Image: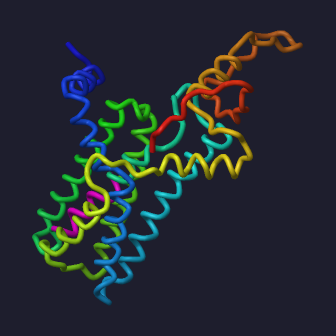
Amino acid sequence: MLSVHELVWHLIFALPPRFWLEVTWLGDFGLLLPAALLIGLWLLVSRRTRGTAWLWASLFGAASALVAASKLAFLGWGIGSARLDFTGISGHTMLAASVWPVALWLVAARAGHRWRVAAAVLGWLLSGVVGLSRLALYAHSASEVVSGLLLGMAASAAFLALQRRRPHPLPRASLVLLTLLVPLAVHPPGHAAPMQGLLERIAMRMAGVQRPFTREDLHRLDAQAAGPVSRPDTAGAASRVPSIRMMRLQPVAGHHAPLERTC
Protein backbone atom coordinates (compact mmCIF):
# COMPACT_ATOMS: atom_id res chain seq x y z
CA MET A 1 0.00 0.00 0.00
CA LEU A 2 1.49 3.31 -1.10
CA SER A 3 1.49 6.28 1.24
CA VAL A 4 0.02 9.64 0.22
CA HIS A 5 3.55 10.98 -0.23
CA GLU A 6 4.45 8.13 -2.57
CA LEU A 7 1.22 8.54 -4.54
CA VAL A 8 1.96 12.22 -5.09
CA TRP A 9 5.41 11.50 -6.46
CA HIS A 10 4.08 8.68 -8.66
CA LEU A 11 1.63 11.20 -10.13
CA ILE A 12 4.38 13.75 -10.69
CA PHE A 13 6.70 11.33 -12.47
CA ALA A 14 3.87 9.84 -14.55
CA LEU A 15 3.48 13.15 -16.41
CA PRO A 16 6.06 14.62 -18.82
CA PRO A 17 8.15 17.65 -17.79
CA ARG A 18 6.58 19.69 -20.59
CA PHE A 19 3.20 19.36 -18.89
CA TRP A 20 4.56 20.71 -15.62
CA LEU A 21 6.26 23.61 -17.43
CA GLU A 22 2.90 24.64 -18.84
CA VAL A 23 1.21 24.30 -15.44
CA THR A 24 3.89 26.28 -13.60
CA TRP A 25 3.33 29.19 -16.00
CA LEU A 26 -0.13 29.58 -14.41
CA GLY A 27 1.66 30.84 -11.31
CA ASP A 28 4.17 33.07 -13.06
CA PHE A 29 4.70 36.62 -11.82
CA GLY A 30 4.38 38.04 -15.34
CA LEU A 31 0.89 36.56 -15.66
CA LEU A 32 -0.59 36.92 -12.19
CA LEU A 33 0.69 40.32 -11.10
CA PRO A 34 -1.18 42.00 -14.01
CA ALA A 35 -4.18 39.79 -13.21
CA ALA A 36 -4.10 40.96 -9.58
CA LEU A 37 -3.95 44.59 -10.75
CA LEU A 38 -6.89 43.99 -13.10
CA ILE A 39 -8.92 42.54 -10.24
CA GLY A 40 -8.27 45.73 -8.31
CA LEU A 41 -9.29 47.85 -11.31
CA TRP A 42 -12.56 45.96 -11.69
CA LEU A 43 -13.33 46.62 -8.04
CA LEU A 44 -12.40 50.29 -8.42
CA VAL A 45 -14.75 50.84 -11.38
CA SER A 46 -17.80 51.04 -9.17
CA ARG A 47 -17.85 53.54 -6.32
CA ARG A 48 -19.71 51.03 -4.14
CA THR A 49 -16.84 48.50 -4.31
CA ARG A 50 -13.85 50.83 -4.02
CA GLY A 51 -13.39 49.90 -0.38
CA THR A 52 -13.25 46.25 -1.47
CA ALA A 53 -10.53 47.16 -3.97
CA TRP A 54 -8.37 48.59 -1.19
CA LEU A 55 -9.02 45.47 0.88
CA TRP A 56 -7.75 43.32 -1.99
CA ALA A 57 -4.71 45.54 -2.51
CA SER A 58 -3.82 45.36 1.19
CA LEU A 59 -4.10 41.58 1.53
CA PHE A 60 -2.42 40.77 -1.77
CA GLY A 61 0.31 43.33 -1.13
CA ALA A 62 1.02 41.97 2.34
CA ALA A 63 1.32 38.38 1.06
CA SER A 64 3.60 39.47 -1.80
CA ALA A 65 5.78 41.45 0.61
CA LEU A 66 6.24 38.37 2.84
CA VAL A 67 7.35 36.30 -0.15
CA ALA A 68 9.82 38.97 -1.27
CA ALA A 69 11.17 39.41 2.27
CA SER A 70 11.74 35.67 2.71
CA LYS A 71 13.63 35.46 -0.60
CA LEU A 72 15.74 38.56 0.01
CA ALA A 73 16.61 37.32 3.52
CA PHE A 74 18.01 34.11 2.07
CA LEU A 75 19.60 35.42 -1.12
CA GLY A 76 21.36 38.28 0.64
CA TRP A 77 22.01 36.98 4.16
CA GLY A 78 21.48 33.22 3.89
CA ILE A 79 18.64 33.11 6.41
CA GLY A 80 16.98 29.73 5.88
CA SER A 81 16.43 26.29 7.37
CA ALA A 82 18.53 23.35 6.19
CA ARG A 83 16.40 20.85 8.10
CA LEU A 84 13.26 22.06 6.32
CA ASP A 85 15.20 22.71 3.10
CA PHE A 86 13.69 26.20 3.18
CA THR A 87 15.17 29.08 1.18
CA GLY A 88 12.09 31.26 0.78
CA ILE A 89 8.34 31.07 0.20
CA SER A 90 7.31 29.82 -3.25
CA GLY A 91 6.16 32.88 -5.17
CA HIS A 92 4.45 30.89 -7.94
CA THR A 93 2.37 28.95 -5.43
CA MET A 94 1.48 32.00 -3.34
CA LEU A 95 0.45 33.99 -6.41
CA ALA A 96 -1.69 31.14 -7.74
CA ALA A 97 -3.39 30.55 -4.37
CA SER A 98 -4.15 34.24 -3.86
CA VAL A 99 -5.08 35.38 -7.37
CA TRP A 100 -6.88 32.47 -9.07
CA PRO A 101 -9.60 31.97 -6.41
CA VAL A 102 -10.44 35.69 -6.42
CA ALA A 103 -10.25 35.97 -10.22
CA LEU A 104 -12.62 33.04 -10.75
CA TRP A 105 -14.90 34.32 -7.99
CA LEU A 106 -15.07 37.65 -9.82
CA VAL A 107 -15.92 35.87 -13.08
CA ALA A 108 -18.83 34.18 -11.28
CA ALA A 109 -19.88 37.37 -9.46
CA ARG A 110 -23.34 37.47 -11.06
CA ALA A 111 -24.02 33.79 -10.38
CA GLY A 112 -25.48 32.33 -7.21
CA HIS A 113 -23.55 31.95 -3.96
CA ARG A 114 -22.82 28.27 -4.57
CA TRP A 115 -21.33 29.01 -7.99
CA ARG A 116 -19.11 31.70 -6.52
CA VAL A 117 -17.89 29.35 -3.81
CA ALA A 118 -17.29 26.61 -6.39
CA ALA A 119 -15.28 29.06 -8.52
CA ALA A 120 -13.07 29.99 -5.56
CA VAL A 121 -12.54 26.32 -4.64
CA LEU A 122 -11.55 25.62 -8.25
CA GLY A 123 -8.96 28.38 -7.95
CA TRP A 124 -7.51 26.83 -4.80
CA LEU A 125 -7.35 23.41 -6.46
CA LEU A 126 -5.56 24.95 -9.42
CA SER A 127 -3.04 26.56 -7.10
CA GLY A 128 -2.36 23.17 -5.54
CA VAL A 129 -1.50 21.79 -8.98
CA VAL A 130 0.79 24.79 -9.57
CA GLY A 131 2.50 23.89 -6.30
CA LEU A 132 2.99 20.32 -7.51
CA SER A 133 4.58 21.67 -10.68
CA ARG A 134 7.20 23.49 -8.60
CA LEU A 135 8.09 20.18 -6.96
CA ALA A 136 8.10 18.33 -10.28
CA LEU A 137 10.51 20.87 -11.79
CA TYR A 138 12.75 20.80 -8.67
CA ALA A 139 12.26 24.55 -8.34
CA HIS A 140 11.20 24.39 -4.67
CA SER A 141 11.17 22.10 -1.69
CA ALA A 142 7.98 20.84 -0.06
CA SER A 143 8.28 23.35 2.81
CA GLU A 144 8.55 26.26 0.36
CA VAL A 145 5.54 25.11 -1.66
CA VAL A 146 3.38 24.44 1.40
CA SER A 147 4.22 27.83 2.93
CA GLY A 148 3.36 29.53 -0.38
CA LEU A 149 0.09 27.63 -0.64
CA LEU A 150 -0.95 28.46 2.93
CA LEU A 151 0.00 32.13 2.60
CA GLY A 152 -1.85 32.55 -0.70
CA MET A 153 -4.92 30.71 0.56
CA ALA A 154 -4.93 32.85 3.70
CA ALA A 155 -4.86 36.06 1.62
CA SER A 156 -7.62 35.01 -0.79
CA ALA A 157 -9.80 33.40 1.91
CA ALA A 158 -9.51 36.49 4.11
CA PHE A 159 -10.50 38.70 1.18
CA LEU A 160 -13.50 36.56 0.23
CA ALA A 161 -14.67 36.36 3.85
CA LEU A 162 -14.29 40.08 4.57
CA GLN A 163 -15.86 41.26 1.31
CA ARG A 164 -19.15 39.55 2.19
CA ARG A 165 -19.87 42.46 4.56
CA ARG A 166 -19.39 44.95 1.71
CA PRO A 167 -21.36 45.78 -1.47
CA HIS A 168 -21.01 42.93 -3.95
CA PRO A 169 -19.30 43.56 -7.33
CA LEU A 170 -21.43 42.69 -10.37
CA PRO A 171 -19.22 42.83 -13.49
CA ARG A 172 -20.11 40.83 -16.58
CA ALA A 173 -18.28 37.50 -16.72
CA SER A 174 -17.38 37.94 -20.42
CA LEU A 175 -15.76 41.32 -19.78
CA VAL A 176 -13.83 40.06 -16.76
CA LEU A 177 -12.52 37.08 -18.75
CA LEU A 178 -11.54 39.35 -21.61
CA THR A 179 -9.52 41.67 -19.40
CA LEU A 180 -7.88 38.76 -17.56
CA LEU A 181 -6.62 37.54 -20.94
CA VAL A 182 -4.79 40.84 -21.51
CA PRO A 183 -1.54 39.63 -19.83
CA LEU A 184 -1.32 36.91 -22.50
CA ALA A 185 -0.53 39.59 -25.06
CA VAL A 186 2.73 40.51 -23.31
CA HIS A 187 3.47 37.28 -21.44
CA PRO A 188 2.59 34.21 -23.56
CA PRO A 189 2.79 30.66 -22.17
CA GLY A 190 6.28 29.27 -21.78
CA HIS A 191 7.92 32.62 -20.98
CA ALA A 192 9.01 33.11 -17.37
CA ALA A 193 9.27 36.59 -15.90
CA PRO A 194 12.86 37.40 -14.76
CA MET A 195 11.75 37.96 -11.17
CA GLN A 196 14.35 35.70 -9.53
CA GLY A 197 17.23 37.46 -11.23
CA LEU A 198 15.88 40.82 -10.12
CA LEU A 199 15.57 39.65 -6.51
CA GLU A 200 19.13 38.30 -6.62
CA ARG A 201 20.50 41.66 -7.77
CA ILE A 202 18.51 43.54 -5.12
CA ALA A 203 19.62 41.13 -2.37
CA MET A 204 23.30 41.37 -3.36
CA ARG A 205 23.16 45.18 -3.35
CA MET A 206 21.35 45.32 -0.01
CA ALA A 207 23.64 42.78 1.69
CA GLY A 208 26.85 43.88 0.01
CA VAL A 209 27.80 40.39 -1.21
CA GLN A 210 29.37 39.32 -4.50
CA ARG A 211 26.87 36.60 -5.28
CA PRO A 212 23.55 35.38 -3.85
CA PHE A 213 23.40 32.52 -1.39
CA THR A 214 22.26 29.17 -2.78
CA ARG A 215 20.63 26.04 -1.47
CA GLU A 216 24.01 24.31 -1.68
CA ASP A 217 25.49 26.95 0.64
CA LEU A 218 22.72 26.35 3.16
CA HIS A 219 23.26 22.60 3.35
CA ARG A 220 27.05 22.73 3.24
CA LEU A 221 27.30 25.21 6.10
CA ASP A 222 24.64 23.34 8.04
CA ALA A 223 26.74 20.18 7.74
CA GLN A 224 29.76 22.10 9.00
CA ALA A 225 27.77 23.46 11.94
CA ALA A 226 26.62 19.93 12.83
CA GLY A 227 30.21 18.75 13.42
CA PRO A 228 31.60 17.56 16.77
CA VAL A 229 29.37 18.68 19.64
CA SER A 230 31.13 20.27 22.61
CA ARG A 231 30.39 19.13 26.16
CA PRO A 232 29.51 21.60 28.91
CA ASP A 233 31.87 22.13 31.86
CA THR A 234 29.25 20.86 34.31
CA ALA A 235 28.19 17.24 34.48
CA GLY A 236 25.44 16.16 32.17
CA ALA A 237 24.67 15.15 28.65
CA ALA A 238 26.38 16.82 25.74
CA SER A 239 24.73 19.92 24.40
CA ARG A 240 22.57 19.25 21.40
CA VAL A 241 22.58 21.01 18.06
CA PRO A 242 19.10 22.57 17.45
CA SER A 243 16.98 20.51 15.10
CA ILE A 244 16.14 23.60 13.04
CA ARG A 245 18.97 26.08 12.58
CA MET A 246 17.86 29.42 11.19
CA MET A 247 21.38 30.45 10.32
CA ARG A 248 22.90 33.64 9.00
CA LEU A 249 25.20 32.06 6.42
CA GLN A 250 28.50 33.56 5.35
CA PRO A 251 29.85 33.48 1.77
CA VAL A 252 32.45 30.81 1.14
CA ALA A 253 35.51 32.06 -0.74
CA GLY A 254 36.11 30.41 -4.06
CA HIS A 255 32.71 28.70 -4.22
CA HIS A 256 30.79 29.36 -7.41
CA ALA A 257 27.65 27.23 -7.31
CA PRO A 258 25.20 27.81 -10.16
CA LEU A 259 22.50 30.37 -9.46
CA GLU A 260 19.08 28.97 -8.68
CA ARG A 261 16.27 30.30 -10.86
CA THR A 262 13.19 29.89 -8.74
CA CYS A 263 10.47 32.18 -7.58
Q: Where is residue 231 in the image (x, y as percent from the top left)?
A: 81, 11
Q: Residue furthest bottom?
A: 47
Q: In this view, does 90 lie to the left or right of 179?
A: right
Q: Where is residue 251 in the image (x, y as percent from the top left)?
A: 72, 32
Which residues are the magenta region? 97-107
Q: How many labels does the image show?
A: 0
Residue 98: say if magenta.
yes
The residue located at (50%, 35%) in the rendering is: 260
Depth check, front residue: 113 or 44: 44
Is 60 drawn above or below residue 261 in the view shown? Answer: below
The residue located at (38%, 47%) in the rendering is: 92
Residue 40: say if magenta.
no
Is 212 drawn above or below residue 14 in the view shown? Answer: below
The residue located at (84%, 14%) in the rendering is: 232
Q: In which quarter of the image is the N terminus?
A: top left
Q: Position of residue 248 (x, y in %)?
A: 70, 36
The residue located at (79%, 10%) in the rendering is: 236
Q: In this view, does 4 lie to the left or right of 213?
A: left
Depth check, front residue: 115 or 129: 129
**Majority SS type along the magenta span:** helix
Depth check, front residue: 98 or 185: 185
Q: Is residue 168 left or right of residue 159?
A: left
Question: Where is residue 147, by image quadrant?
Answer: top left
Depth check, front residue: 16 or 92: 16
Q: In which quarter of the image is the C terminus?
A: top left
